Amino acid sequence: MASKKGIALTAGIAGAIVGSSFLIWYIPQSSPGTLIGPPRADNEVIGDVYARQNDLAAGIDMKFEQWKNDDLGAGDMSAQIVSTTSQIENMRQDLNNRQPAQEWRESYDLYMQALDSYTAYLDALKLKVDGGDKTDPDPVLKQHWQDLVDQSVEAMPS
């Protein structure tokens, strides 16, 4: 004879299997296409990278000023720079993995150069923070990546 505990356990397992099977069928039916979005246009991809990179740059500049004013610890600032560098590398991969139309290639190439230049700027910031040097890094580094971003925007087709 089967025990009540064994019957309850078997019923519970069977209910879980039936419930999960239903969910596996129901979720794709109720929200088709949410797992894989529609293909993105070249201007959307580079526009997204542009917006995210500008947000990160503004955030890092603000944090660096806070660090210079002793409102942020060196460890926190260094961690912020490492996180930003990682996000920039992901953005570069987004652009690099993309196969843009011919008219977008120059803009994409210039923006990847801008991201590389921004990474060099972040490396210079990290050296300043790690060394306790509260002066701004060489302004040429910042100007270079900003110039490349401007060139990329100018190269975008109309």
Image (cartoon, grey):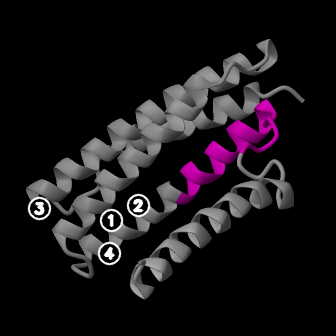
Span of residues in magenta: 36-55
What residue does disc 2 label? 60
Q: Secondary structure at mark 2?
A: helix
Q: Is 87 situated above or below 4? A: above
Amino acid type of the residue that numbered disc 3 sits on in the rendered structure: Gly
Can you say whether 151 is above or below 11 in the image? Answer: above
Is residue 53 highlighted in magenta?
A: yes
Identify the amino acid type marked 1.
Answer: Phe
Which residue is painted at 27% across and 42% down in the image? 123
Tell me the element at label 4: helix
Report which residue position mark 4 lands on: 66
Amino acid type of the residue that numbered disc 4 sits on in the rendered structure: Gln
Does residue 106 appear to the left or right of 3 in the view shown?
right
Q: Which mark is residue 29?
A: none
* Label 2, residues with CA under 10 Å away: few <14, some 14-19, many ≥20: some
Q: Earlier in the sequence, mark 2 or mark 3?
A: 2
Residue for badge 3: 132
Q: Residue at x 81, y 16 (%)?
A: 103
